[in-house]
Amino acid sequence: MLGVSFFLALSAAGRGSPQGPAEPSASAAPGRAPSAEYRLSPERRAKAIAYARARYRLHFAAFAWTLLVLAAIVRGKLGPRFRDLAERLSRRRFVQALVFVPLLLGTQALLELPPGIYGHDLSRFYGQSVQGWGSWLWDAAKELLVAIAVAVPLAWLLYAVLRRSPRRWWLWFWLALLPILVFLIFVAPLAIDPLFFRFDPLAPKHPELAQAIERVTANVGLPIPQDRMFEMNASAKYRSLNAYVTGLGASKRVVVWDTTLAAMTVPQTLYVFGHEMGHYVLHHIPRTIAFLWALLFALLAAGAALLSRLLGRLGGRWGIRGLGDWASLPVLLLFLAIASELALPLVNAYSRSQEHAADVFGLEAIRGVVPNERRVAAEAFQVLGEVSLDDPEPSPFIRLWLYSHPPIAERIRFVAGSESATSPRPSPR
């Protein structure tokens, strides 16, 4: 399960929760300095602040709810009950995992539905989602099935290592995780993402844009094959504007949401693409894997010492035989939930540094391809903020704790005020 959460953190695409297609910002006259401010009408500004604050409250409420759910599972001794059932059905450890893990994850997912339901209702209330409840529930079911498919072999591996090496299990499991996670991230765009959205090659549907993108890639001397560019039918569920880079090696690709293509002009879309190309050519995915894998080392080492002491004192009261018992998994999940939340500021700070580097690269990529790259970039962020109802004034604490990207106002000020922007031009791997 530690590996499942790590994988989900890596593969989750940052999804804005936008308002309905915003009217594109009026373009400044060629050569005129772009606006360095994120501007919203008074009504839209109030709505953006209200929506942002509701999402912030939801994040911390959902975290507290998760802790309550896992604590209830532990104190209610559901782990021992599921373990006893699994052991009665089979003596084979992998079969036991096939019984125990789905029961535990299914129970947890069911109990954690309320925050998810509220979050979806919130996005619909503010016009951020067009997804119906039936489709949303089906997506939640598919996410659970994917999580179970990943978690069963990972849990089997974790407890096999725990039983063989009670003292050094965390080190061997940490070493085993890297190739597994690399494989999962490799197959995600091929086998998992298509379960939720349709992906079409970009060039056949948008030949003019594809040609413009070729000029951008040629501009920085880093061609990205057209078969690595895809359009995602986000409009079936969202009104968000987004693009992202995913996959590794042969599965590595740039994905642009169809909502982005509909709401932005070609020059603005080129900047968005240039930003994503920065993630692609600067190898941010493998670097993020390395960063989070190193963070996992610290979390696992700390968790091993803490959980051994905790179960030594309270395991009997909870019906848990020891750390190598299937029934200890809810306690492991509780520790992971707390550790992941506490590590969030560090992870987000690292992510913000990558996003800023991609912003810089995006300016470099479109320089000379569009008439005024600073104006175009500022307008692209303005449209993104308007559509997504981005918070115009997040507090320093919220920025530190929750923002994986720099605030939209900060990004607009940067691109509008940059006289020059340079970025390394490594060859793609």
Image (cartoon, helix red, strand yellow):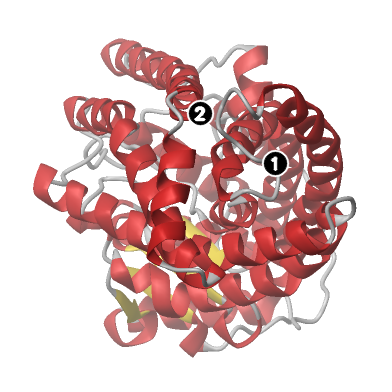
Q: Secondary structure at mark 2?
A: helix
Q: Report the disc number at residue 49.
A: none
Which residue is at a point 26% across and 65% down the rendered structure image? 233
Residue 418: give x, y in percent of width and height.
Answer: 74, 41
Does residue 26 appear anywhere in the picture? no
Contact flag, marks 2 and 1 (Cβ < 8 Å): no
C-alpha separation, residue under disc 2 versus residue under disc 1: 13 Å
Q: Nearer the viewer, residue 310 or 246?
A: 310
Residue 129: give x, y in percent of width and height.
Answer: 22, 40
First-in-chain label (2 vs 1): 2
User: Picture quarter containing residue 256?
Assistant: bottom left
Residue picked out by circle 1: 322
Does residue 374 appear anywhere in the picture? yes
Residue picked out by circle 2: 74
The crowding category of the residue bearing disc 1, from other C-alpha atoms within 10 Å (few below 14, some 14 to 19, many at least 20), is some
Which residue is at a point 73% across and 49% down the rendered structure image? 354
- Above or below, 389 relative to 144: above
Residue 351: give x, y in percent of width and height.
Answer: 70, 44
Q: Hey, what amino acid is under mark 1?
A: Gly
- Above or below, 353 relative to 196: above
Q: Nearer the viewer, residue 212 or 182?
A: 182
User: Picture quarter containing residue 400?
Assistant: top right
Residue 148: give x, y in percent of width and height.
Answer: 42, 60
Image quadrant for the C terminus?
bottom right
Q: Nearer the viewer, residue 387 or 66?
A: 66
Q: Hey, what amino acid is under mark 2?
A: Val
Q: Is residue 144 found left or right of 347 in the rendered image?
A: left
Q: Is residue 405 found left or right of 389 in the rendered image?
A: right
User: Picture quarter containing residue 36?
Assistant: top right
